[in-house]
Amino acid sequence: MQKTRRLALLLPGGIALLLGLDAALLLLGLPAPLTTERLPDIHGVLLVLGFVGTLVSAERAVALRRWWGFSAPITLGAGAIALLTPLPIEAGKALLLGGTLAQLGVYAALWRRQPAAAIAMQIIGAGLAAGGAALWLGGAPVATTLPWLVGFLVATIAGERVELSRVGGVTPAQEQGALAATWALAGGVVAATLWPAVGHVLLGAALLALVAWLVRHDVARRTAGATGAPRFMAWCLIGGYVWLTVAGTIWLLAGHVPEGPAYDAVVHAVFLDFVLSMIMAHASVILPAVLRTPLPYHPAFYGPVVLLHASLALRLVVGDLKAQPWALQLGGALNIVAVLSFFAFAVTSAVVAARRARPARPATSAPEAAPSPEPEPARESRLEIVP
Ligand code: HEM
C-alpha cells in the first residue's frame, strides 16, 4: 500500500518527463505524439522543476521521515500537471513556486538535524530553485531564469556528492571549500541576472571551481577502476563532470548566450548530460529509497549512458558548433531514445528483482500461510552507500 502511494507520488514527475521529451521533439521540429501550443514553451521548466524537482524532493522527503515533507514533491508534481492542463499558466507557475518553498522547509528541517556543509549546499540549491520559480511567475522568460535552474540542480547534486564523499574520507575543512564554491555559484547566478554580460562570466568561473572540487574529492575517482555498480556509477559521474566543465567554459569564454547554438549547448551540457548522468548513476540508490523496491545494477545500463554521451556530442559538436541541422535533430532524437531506454531498463530490472525477492509458495499452500513479506526496505541513509 505504501509502495502504491509512493508510486503515485512519482507519477506526475514521470508524466512531466514524458511530455517534456514530447516537447523536445516539437522544439527539434520533429513529429511528436502530442502537440499543444504551450508544450514547447514549458519544456525546460517541466523537466527541471516538474521531473527532476519532484524526484529530488521525494527522495529528500523520505530521508526526512516527516509526513509534511511530502508536500514538496506533491506540490511540484501538481504544478507540472497544472502546466499541462488548459488552466491559466500562472496556476502551474504558482504551484511550482510553492513546491520549491516547501522543499526549502524540508532542507531547513534536515539542517536542524545535521548542520553540515553538504546540507547548506542543498539549501542554497533549493533557494535558487525558489528564486527561478519566482522570476518565472513574475513574467521573466525561461532564458532569464536559466542560471537559477542551473544553480538549483548543480548545487543540489554537488551537495549530495559531498554528503557521500564523507565516507571516502573528505574532511569538514575540505567540505567548506565545496560550500564556498557553491556560495560563489549563487553569487554568479544573481550577478548573471543583474549584469548579464559580466555575471555569466563569473557564473562560468564559479561552476568550474565547483567542478574542480568535485573532480578532486569525489570518491568516483577511486571507484572508476572497480567493477560492477561502483564502476558504472563512477563513469556516469565522471562523464557528467566533463559536460559540466564544457558548460562552465562556454559561459567563462562567451559570457551571456541567451539563444542560439551556444545556448542549446550550455543548457543541455548541464541538464541533459550532467543531470541525467547523475540520475542514471544514482537510480539504484534513489528508486529503492523512495519506492522500497530493489533496483539491481545490470551491465545493460551502460548502453543508454554511452548513447546519451555520444548523441549529445553529435548534437553539440556537429549540430551546434558546426551548424548542421540534421545533426541537431538526429542527436536530439537519440538523446530521447537514451533517456527512455534507461528508464525502460530500470523499470524492467526493478520488476524482475521484485519478482525474484518474493519467496516461492510452499508446495502445500495452507490457507493460514503468512502473506509474502515486502522486499527488504532499501537503506535510506545515503551516507551508508559508497558508489
Ligand atoms: C532528451 C532530449 C532533449 C532534447 C532533444 C531537448 C531539446 C531542446 C531544444 C531543441 C531546446 C531549444 C533550444 C534553443 O532554444 O536553442 C531546448 C531547450 C531547453 N531544454 Fe531541452 N531537450 C532535451 C532534454 C532536456 C532535459 C532533460 C532538460 C532538463 C532537465 C532540458 C531543459 C531545457 C531547458 C531549460 C531549455 C531552455 C528552454 C527555454 O529557453 O524556453 N532539456 N531543449
Image: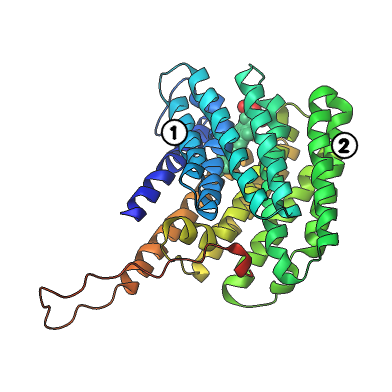
Q: Quadrant of the N terminus?
A: bottom left
The alpha-carbon separation of the residues under discs 1 and 2 comes to 38 Å
Instruction: Between residue 323 and residue 253, name the one nearer to us.
Output: 253
Residue under label 2, please give it: 202
Q: Which of disc 2 and disc 1 is earlier in sequence?
A: 1
Looking at the image, residue 309 sits to the left or right of residue 9; the answer is right
Other residues around mark 2 within 10 Å, as few (<14) / some (14–19) / many (≥20)? many
Query: Looking at the picture, how far across and down is residue 54, in whole percent?
Result: 51, 42
Question: Would you say residue 216 is visible in this rendering?
Answer: yes
The amino acid at mark 2 is Leu
Residue shown at 37% from the left, 45% from the top: 8
Instruction: Between residue 35 and residue 286, name the one nearer to us.
Output: 286
Q: For the residue with label 2, is its CB less than 8 Å from the closest atom of ligand 1? A: no
Residue under label 1, please give it: 32
Which one is closest to the eye, mark 1 or mark 2?
Answer: 2
Instruction: Between residue 197 and residue 246, name the one nearer to us.
Output: 197
